[in-house]
Image: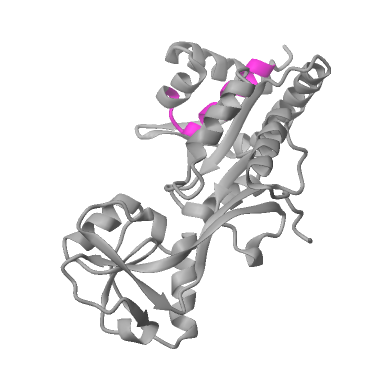
Amino acid sequence: MPVELRHLEHFVALAEESSFTRAAARLNLVQSALSVSIRNLEKDLEATLFDRTSRGVRLAAAGEALLPAARRVLREVATVREEVDAVRGVVRGRLRIGIMQSLALIDAGRMFAAFHQAHPGVVIEPQPAHGGSVALAEHVRHGELDLAFAWQPEASARGLRVAELATEPFVLVVPTSRRLPRRLELADLSDEAFVEFPEGWGARTLSDQAFRNAGIQRRIVVEVADILTCAELVRAGFGVAIMPKSMIRSRGLTWRTVSGLPQWGVSLIASSDRHLTAAAAAFVDLVCTTFDVVLATDDE
């Protein structure tokens, strides 16, 4: 029996969710129907694609080999459908777009609303990344996302097309009870305890580099992968933090300018190795028109 496209769609969803429950919800299927579909695919291919455990499912060796090919087939089928729709002046499909934890700097919600109004046939799938901007860029490179809103430093832009949308300064975030000068130097912070984001996050990478370039060893007392938690720890007096200015929303906090801290911002990024889907191309056009920018290639 030939492999059916719906079986490949079900396989990719389960591979990405690592859970029959989550994958079934994503596909709008009952879990039993998804289980039957995966068993039929394994039977057709005469291979075990997943290892089932008490904690969920994970790809077996055959599944690891199938996943890139399955994604490629589904992308090609989606492209065929989109090109036929484009002839009729219709944009359909889904837009998988990665998002940073905070997009207040660009009012992304307004753009999503405008895009949905212009292209109601597109299903928008915003997807956060626990690894911050670095992880979002990797997901775009590997085709797991069509686009992403992320801060993309120029040095790590290989394989990507990048449009810088807006920038703002990093600042020192402290409780309002702290008495500090309005302007500081990095050397003034050598005795501070810091609340930080995990290593690998774009904001953490840039702040680490700034202190390293200044020859200052700082003391990080806790790492948290959440902006609101970071802010609350600072407000409670656990330490100070280096954050983009637009991320400061909690009461009881204030900020200070620090010479030597880099700029932060939001970029729209896409892969330079893959053709944009019709939905992604339409969204890029909306964003670039809104901000009067161009989605540059990685060697421009």
- Name which residue lies at 76% across and 42% down: 274
Structure colour scheme: one colour
Q: Is residue 13 magenta?
A: yes
- Name which residue lies at 65% across and 34% down: 283
Q: Position of residue 249 (x, y in %)?
A: 31, 51
Q: Nearer the viewer, residue 153 or 113?
A: 113
Residues shaded magenta: 5-20
Relative height, residue 140 to residue 175 (above, below) = above
Q: Nearer the viewer, residue 285 or 268?
A: 285
Q: Can residue 200 be spotted in the picture?
A: no
Quarter containing the N terminus: top right
Left or right placement of residue 86 versus residue 42 in this view: right
Left or right placement of residue 118 versus residue 281 in this view: left
Relative height, residue 286 to residue 273 (above, below) = above
Magenta: main secondary structure equals helix
Q: Position of residue 74 (x, y in %)?
A: 70, 26
Residue 120: quarter of image? top right
Relative height, residue 204 to residue 105 (above, below) = below
Q: Position of residue 117 (x, y in %)?
A: 58, 22
Residue 176: quarter of image? bottom left
Residue 152: quarter of image? bottom right
Which residue sits furthest right?
Answer: 87
Q: Can residue 102 be spotted in the picture?
A: yes
Q: Position of residue 80 (x, y in %)?
A: 80, 22
- Name which residue lies at 77% across and 28% down: 76
- Name which residue lies at 60% across and 28% down: 115
Q: Nearer the viewer, residue 17 or 213?
A: 213
Q: Is residue 75 magenta?
A: no
Quarter containing the C terminus: bottom right
Left or right placement of residue 78 versus residue 27 in this view: right
Q: Nearer the viewer, residue 48 or 157?
A: 157
